Amino acid sequence: MFKLKLPTDPRWANLAEKNISEVLTDHAFCELKAASTATSLISKFPDKTELVQAMVELVKEEIEHFHRVHELLLSRGYELGKERKDEYVNELTQFCIKSGYSREEYLINKLLLAALIEARSCERFKVLSEHFKNSDAVLSQFYHELMISEANHYTLFIGFARKYTQNIDVEKRWNEILEFEGQIIQNYGISELIHG
Ligand SMILES: [Fe+2]
Ligand SMILES: [Fe+2]
C-alpha cells in the first residue's frame, strides 16, 4: 500500500481492540497533530499560495476528524485521555528533518514526512476497518471513511513535494524515507497506539 515496505503485523489489531479507548485517544491526538502540521506549513511558507489554500482546507478536515473521534469516545462512555509520545513519528522526524537544511530541503522533507505519516495512518485505519467488519459496524465504517481521507492527504502531500522541488531528487529521497520506515516499523505494532 502506497509503496510502504511492510504491512502492519495483524496482531496489532487484536491489541487495539482490547484497548479501544487508548487507541481512540491516541487517534484523536494524531488528528490534532495533523492539523498543527498544516498550520505550521502555512506559517513557514506563506508565499506558496496553493499550499496555503490546501492547508487551510486540510486544517478544517483534520479538526473535523478530531471532533468525530472525540464524539466517538464520548458515545462509548470514555473521555479523551492524556496525549502519549509518538516514538514512531519522532524517529521519522529525526531521519527526515536535519538542522541546517535549506528552505527547499526543509519544505520537501516536511512534505514527504507528512505524506508518509498519512500513508501509514491510512494503512492502520484499513487494518482496523477490516478487523471490526463483523464485530463493530460503527467502528468499521468510521475507519473506512477516515482511511479514504488519509489516502487523499497522502496524495496531496506527495503532489506538493513534486510540485515545489527544484534541486532535490524527490523520488530518490522518497525511496530513502520509505526504506527507513520499512526498517523501523518492524519495532512497532506492539502497543495500543495508532503508530505504536
Ligand atoms: Fe485525519
Ligand atoms: Fe490526514
Image (spheres, helix red, strand yellow):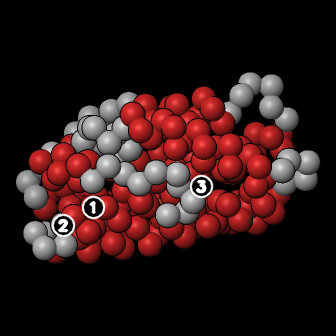
Note whether residue 21 is visible: no
* Residue 115, label in figure: 3
Residue at image coords 36%, 56%: 124
Asked if the residue under mark 2 is in contact with the one under mark 1, i.e. CB atoms within 8 Å, the reply is yes
**CA–CA distance in space, label 1 to label 3:** 20 Å
* Horizontal and vertical percent position of residue 107: 75, 46
Mark 2 residue CB less than 8 A from any atom of ligand 1: no
* Horizontal and vertical percent position of residue 46: 77, 52
Residue 186 placement: quadrant: top left
Residue at image coords 61%, 67%: 155
Label 3 neighbour load within 10 Å: few <14, some 14-19, many 20+: many
Residue 29 placement: quadrant: top left
Label 1 neighbour load within 10 Å: few <14, some 14-19, many 20+: many
Asked if the residue under mark 2 is in contact with the one under mark 3, i.e. CB atoms within 8 Å, the reply is no
* Residue 132, label in figure: 2
Identify the image quadrant of the C terminus: top left
Left/right of residue 163 with respect to residue 188 in the rendered view: right
Dot 2 amino acid type: Phe
Note whether residue 153 is visible: yes
Element carrying mark 1 = helix
Q: Mark 3 or mark 1, which is nearer the start of the sequence?
A: 3
* Residue 13, label in figure: none
In this rendering, the answer to whether 74 lies above or below 93 is below
Name the residue that disc number 1 marks.
128
Residue at image coords 57%, 59%: 3
* Horizontal and vertical percent position of residue 83: 32, 35
Farthest-out residue, right:
167
Dot 1 amino acid type: Leu
**CA–CA distance in space, label 1 to label 2:** 6 Å
Left/right of residue 30 with respect to residue 173 in the rendered view: left
Farthest-out residue, top:
99
